[in-house]
Amino acid sequence: MEESEKESIKEASVEVSQEFKTLINTDDVDSLKQIQHLILGRLQDSNAVLSHFNEYSENCFNEVSGDFSKNTRLLRSMKSDLDYIFQKLRSMKAKLLATYPDAFSDNSKGEIVDRRPDLELSQ
């Protein structure tokens, strides 16, 4: 390329950039930058608060997870004990009904349906 051609390209690019600058209001750009900076600060604050909350939640969970598992084992043990007790009671009632048919009222002779929810099924 010739020197004059290079200069004309340079002058054209300067002119285009000046025209482009007139399309953009510098006050609007400054305002957008300020708003973006404000939003960035708020997001950083929110991130810090959420990180703190996550750490706090993790500490709380670690403190009570042992109690939860211990109480879960206790409840399952109690459930199996109660199931055994009710099974024995049904067995005794059946023996009593066989031996003494008039021992219970007519309403209690019907089949007993266990209506308790099964807590071991995932819902």
Image: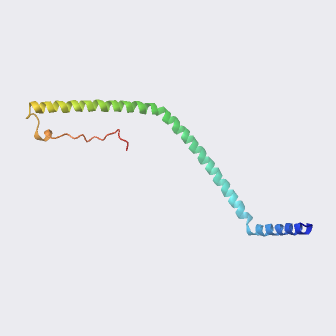
**Side of 7 relative to 86 (left or right):** right
- Specify the farthest residue to the right: 3
Q: Residue at 15%, 33% (x, y): give it.
A: 94
- The residue depicted at 63 percent of the width and 54 percent of the height is 39
Measured as percent of width and height from the top left, residue 115 is found at 25, 42
What residue lies at 58% left-to-right and 44% top-to-bottom? Answer: 49
Q: Report which quarter residue 15 is drawn in.
A: bottom right
Question: Residue furthest toward the front?
Answer: 1
Residue 90 x/y as whole percent: 19, 33
Q: Is residue 91 left or right of residue 122?
A: left
Residue 55 vs residue 98, the one in the foreground: 98
Residue at figure coordinates x 65%, y 54% from the top left: 38
Tell me where residue 68 appears, x and y as whole percent. 42, 33
In the rendered image of this protein, does residue 10 appear above or below residue 45? below
- Using the image as rendered, state which of residue 6 and residue 114 is in the foreground: 6
Q: From this view, report whether residue 22 is shown above or below residue 40.
A: below
Q: Quadrant of residue 55?
A: top right
Of the 4 image quadrants, the one containing the C terminus is top left
Viewer-side residue, 40 vs 115:
115
Indicate left or right for 64 with 73 as reference: right
Q: How is the image coloured?
A: rainbow
Q: How many marks?
A: 0
